[in-house]
Image (cartoon, rainbow, N blue to C red):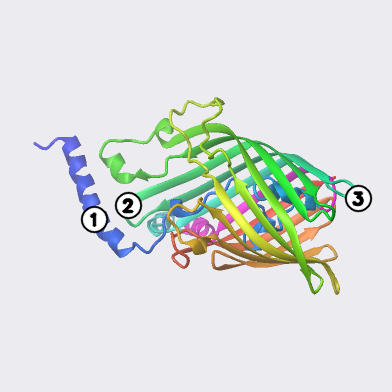
Amino acid sequence: MISISNKRLTLALLLASSSYSFYSSFCSVALAMDQITRPYQSVRSFGMGGTKITNGLYDDNFFGNPARVVANPTSKFTFIEMTPIDINTRTLNAVSAISANPSNAIANLAGNNLHERFELVTPAYYLAATGERKFALAFGMLSSVQIDINLRQSYRLNLGAVADAGPALTLGYKLLHDDALAIGLTTHLSYRVSTSPNYSLMDYLAGSGPSLTSLAGQGSMVDFDFGGTYQLTQIKDFDITLGAAIQNLLGGDYSNLSLLPLGFASGPVTQPRSYGVGIAATRAVWGSFTYTSLALEASDILNNRDGSIFRLIHIGAETRWHSIIARLGLNQGYFTAGLGLDFRFLTLNFATYGEELGLNVGTYEDRRYAFSLGLHF
């Protein structure tokens, strides 16, 4: 007689054979873990096509270009800045479908990525370089959780989850007689927990059942970001500024600190050293509008695995009318739009953006919607 374990192995081999044909047919479908992982990015940045190297403000100081801390218009204390919703269209549709017919909905999830992200900054303080002050700083406690679930057409299940937490301190200084040059440094103390990149249903059928220790890893590190901006010239009342930044100077491998409170033996998904460059045109007053900016950037360089260079391109624009802020952009070739409401003590930001889940632009757009709110003093 054939043993139970042999039956399970035979079934696993049959599934493996079948999955090859599925993979050949659906090789153009993206995998959830092919997306670029970022520890933090504001809803404001999402609305502006992902730009932040030349136009980032406040919470984007921490994981964008630290030199931009000198551009924060005013000093403020943030009691809380929260992004409770960063969800994609497929997750919204799945929730509705599962409520109506769970069995059919789950069967139709194959090949779709389910995405949700939560971000929190509390508290944070920003000292602006206003008046004669050339020095600026920002300090904040940041945390984020991103979950991506993808049942592939090849019968492999992606359980992609990354959780980050820790403080960040950003220091910036303006140089030269006209303050044209700014430099900045951010120090991160980060703790990360993440799932293993892949877990296969075939592994389960072959007898390798999942456990918390096998599915997750942890690590902690201290690392640094460095950046600069330079006001190059002025063209028709627009200030032209260049920007460049390096994230995770030490490599981002979450291994140089021994803060490991959980019982996971393996390390988490790493956050590789990456680079960003860009150029922006800004104008303080333009008719009825204020704080108008347009930016072209390339970011996440070296944090792109084997992906196309076009996944690094970000274009964004922002302008303000009283307390209303409008944003437009292109993120990895997909349109973005955003709306901000700034009532001094209360800020609200909405954005829709497309994220590329494949290795090349145009492979698989993941359309997402995000919302954040902040309380400031």
Q: Eyeballing the image, is 76 above or below 100?
A: above
Task: Name which residue type carries label 2.
Answer: Tyr
Name the N-terminal-most of marks 2 and 1. Answer: 1
Task: Name which residue type carries label 3.
Answer: Gly
How many dots with numbers?
3
Q: Which residues are magenta?
A: 73-100
Q: Quadrant of residue 123?
A: top right
Name the N-terminal-most of marks 3 and 2. Answer: 3
Secondary structure of the residue carrying tag 3 is: loop
Q: Residue at label 3? A: 131
Q: Quadrant of residue 248?
A: top right
Contact (CB < 8 A) between labels 2 and 1? yes
Q: Residue at label 1? A: 18
Q: Position of residue 50 (x, y in %)?
A: 62, 59
Name the N-terminal-most of marks 3 and 1. Answer: 1
Q: Nearer the viewer, residue 143 or 102?
A: 143
Q: Eyeballing the image, is 189 above or below 160?
A: above
Instruction: Using the numbered discs, state the Cα–Cα distance from disc 2 to disc 1 in whole angstroms.
Output: 9 Å
Instruction: Please tell me how crowded label 1 is: few (under 14), some (14-19), or many (20+) other residues with Cα within 10 Å.
Output: few
